[in-house]
Amino acid sequence: MRSQKVDQRAARVIHRALVLNELRRCGPLSRSQLSERTQLSPAAVSFVTADLLEEDLLIERDHHTGRGRAIPLDVNYAGHFAVGLKIMESGLEAVLTDLSLQVLATLTVTYSDHTPASVTAAAAQATAALLGGAGLPRERLGGVGLGLPGTIGPHGTCLTSYRLGWRDVPITDLISQATGVPVWADNDVNAFATAERLVGRGKHARDFLVVTLGRGIGAGLILNGELYRGGRGGAGELGHLLSEPGGRPCECGKLGCLEAYASEPSLLRQLAEAGRALPDAASFARQLPHDPAAQAITAAAGERLGRALAQTANLLDPDLIIVGGEGVRLGDTLFTPLRRALDRHLHAAGPGTLPVLIEPWGDDAWARGAAGLVTEQFFGDSTLHQPARASPA
């Protein structure tokens, strides 16, 4: 009897995921269309959609036939909400979104240090402020998603983060206890890739890369429709592919990494070596159209990035590459040589056959990606570890 109940629960979870994800990808569908597309029986579709309507995860759209079975159903993206937090060294960026990851409110909280205690306090402050500002009850919040630089292990533990100086920090447990809601965490690039898979430009692709350019260089690998993390959670370290044997030092301690040549801090260092010191990456981007030295450095970085992406594509054969991050503001000076190098070094595909899509970048994009870690749970196809949950009061 126990085995039968377990099997029924497992089937229910699978059926929910099938229905929700078909609607997420295709938009409003009738129950009969859902049955045809998911290969579930009409009875199974009726059962699971009744549950989802009761939970406010589905909504009935207007129809014109007058026949109950023809009523189109859609995901009720406005029925539940998520908080996304991008954790940085000097503070965190927070967003409140609905299930479509539409940003409803934003907030920045700074801290004097990035110890786990300071980050936890800031996370609790941001979550309470976003909920209070929107007038939302806590029960409509699906949880909190964390995106941070580092390797995230089982149960949301930050195994290592060079940038934050963390090792084996149970950050999801800490923030869940402080906020009283479930918390999920992932590397910030993986979180961004998850958002692209769910509701972004990778929504209809099975195999694609999400590459982020900025302070660092990372990649999220979506393979066979799922985020690939590797055996220890460290997959996607594109910035630490070898670009120049014995070359420039990287913040990871090794020599010649791609990040040491093509990240925003490395571009600033190279320009300073050419006698044109600038205070930050935004200044570099503004100076770029007028500075031949900056243009040459950026073009060389684009060439290196294109070669690295070709190596990755030759190994994984993705359908497309999506590029985001603060570095997209460098524009065609970076992306024209990148695309040329990619086409030149691709093995199987001809020039222009591997699309490279540039994702417009906003200040809230990282936090919005983190909110996708929460949204993913509603669609039931998550590959994340179980979330941390607050202890009972």
Image (tube, helix red, strand yellow):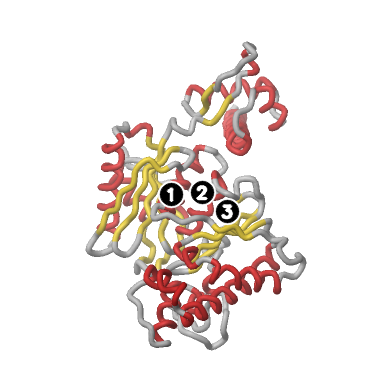
Estimate how packed mark 1 is, as few (under 14), some (14 to 19) or many (20 or more) residues with alpha carbons within 10 Å: many
| Amino acid type of the residue tagged 1 in the rendering | Arg
Q: Amino acid at mark 2?
A: Ala
Residue underneath mark 1: 368
Query: Which quadrant would residue 167 be assigned to in this image?
Result: bottom left
Q: Is residue 64 positioned above or below 15 on the image?
A: above
Using the image, determine if residue 250 lies above or below residue 167.
Answer: below
Describe residue 320's horizontal placement relative to residue 257 as left or right.
right
Task: Identify residue type, mark 3.
Answer: Leu
* Above-or-below relation of 181 to 108: above
Which label sits on residue 195? 2
Mark 3 vs mark 2: give the one in front.
Answer: 2
**Looking at the image, do the residues carrying marks 2 and 1 touch, with CB atoms under 8 Å apart?**
yes
Q: CA distance from mark 3 to mark 1?
A: 17 Å
Sequence order check: which comes first, mark 2 or mark 1? Answer: 2
Say which residue label 3 marks.
Answer: 227
Q: Earlier in the sequence, mark 3 or mark 1?
A: 3
